[in-house]
Amino acid sequence: MNIVARAVSSFVMAVAVLCVPAASRADDDAARIAAAVDRAYRPLLKQYGIPGMAVAVAVNGQQHFFNFGVAAKGRNAPVTRDTLFEIGSVSKTFTATLAAYAVDRGALALDAHPSTYMPELRGAAIDGATVLNFGTYSAGGLPLQLPASVNNDATMLAYFKAFKPAAAPGERRQYSNPSLGLFGHLAALAMKRDFADVMERDIFPQLGLKDSYVRVPAAAMERYAWGIKGDKAVRVNPAVFAAETYGVKTSAADMLHFVEVNMAPDKLDAPMRRAVEATHVGYFKIGAMVQGLGWEQYDFPVTLETLRAGNSADMIFKPQAATPLSPPRAPQGATLFDKTGSTTGFGSYVAFVPARKIGLVMLANRNFPIPARIDAAHAVLETLAALPR
């Protein structure tokens, strides 16, 4: 064997030696992730009678998908990465992105008052709050839901004109669909367009989402899961602000892509990149949680107790003292962003840590307890964070 041949042979052997450990490590990481997901989520299906669930994980630029059960109880269609789920209030993160996009285009101003876009509210008590207050649940005590009597635009307008705040704007956070719903409604009015049209024609495509909808088209209905309440198959019903607050239907594949572009928005075109980055800014501190537009934030690593507290019933149903961040705070160090969501028949949870390049999506066709979602996600996120980078 001549010198050139020996050199080539040595190089090939060296590459082979280097590649085996890398491949082996990747396989080992994938096995650890799969075991963590299975251990955390599979028992929940039986415990809470969940027909089906899709879990998706992103770590160091790699995607992993895990599917459990069926898309509808009593049917044989298995859940896949392309099954469409209702994501409930995780939709608010898309609404926040739409509003931030409207701000970037110069159509919407966060420091404006609602009457700027809804002149009918001029002189109403609620007009003392700003667009930002509605986007951060700090407009003065709007309730969790609109009354049943509010069933069209006229009754919605009358409700807000008559509303009497229980606190000054920015004084406290009170989680509220009417608050975030009006936020999205004002953004669409500022753009002089229908909210669902902006979302489906502008926001989803620019985010690179190809299988996300406010209005599921006929061609995709076969993949739209059925939720379950008790033993009854259910899907979300139309309502005032449904589109803005809990109306998005999407797949695990699309939702994981949304997580990835939130972790690396530099891959987006400039206007959408700025919009996504704007949803990562924190405006109010509530205990250990920071409230941004759509997303909620925690210093990472975060304890299970802290994450549970931030997603607790008290945080959903009770007003909480809020401390304004002045100036508003961009993420500092490792930050976990999360959001939980529910409709009558579906439950979801999404979390990601850009600094660690880890993210998780869980979509289920039953609205099961939020503490169980947090426990499972926290366990998987700890596994992901421990993997070599």
Image (cartoon, rainbow, N blue to C red):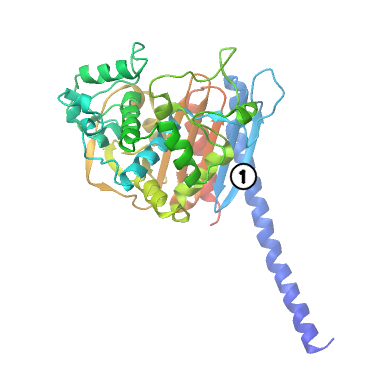
> Along the horizontal axis of the image, is 24 left or right of 269?
right
Name the residue: 34% across, 11% down: 149
Q: Is residue 337 visible?
A: yes
Task: Give the image location of residue 105, x and y in percent.
Answer: 33, 47
Q: Quadrant of residue 19?
A: bottom right
Locate the N terminus by quadrant.
Answer: bottom right
Residue at the far bottom in the pictured view:
3
Residue closer to the observer: 7 or 268: 268
Q: Quadrant of residue 6?
A: bottom right
Name the residue: 69% across, 57% down: 24
Q: Is residue 210 above or below residue 248?
A: below
Task: Give the image location of residue 106, x and y in percent.
Answer: 29, 46
Name the residue: 64% across, 21% down: 72
Task: Give the image location of residue 199, x and y in percent.
Answer: 44, 36
Residue at the far left in the pictured view:
123
Residue closer to the observer: 195 or 34: 195
Q: Check disc 1: other Cα within 10 Å, few if <14, some if 14-19, many if 20+.
A: some
Q: Is residue 382 visible?
A: no
Q: Amino acid at mark 1?
A: His
Residue at the far right in the pictured view:
1
> Along the horizontal axis of the image, is 319 left or right of 194?
left
Q: Is residue 278 above or below residue 366?
A: below
Name the residue: 47% across, 32% down: 374
Task: Give the image location of residue 224, x and y in percent.
Answer: 60, 27
> Along the horizontal axis of the image, is 241 left or right of 45?
left
How many numbered discs sit on the rendered protein?
1
Residue closer to the observer: 301 or 63: 63
Which secondary structure, mark 1? strand
User: What residue would you read off at disc 1?
Assistant: 64
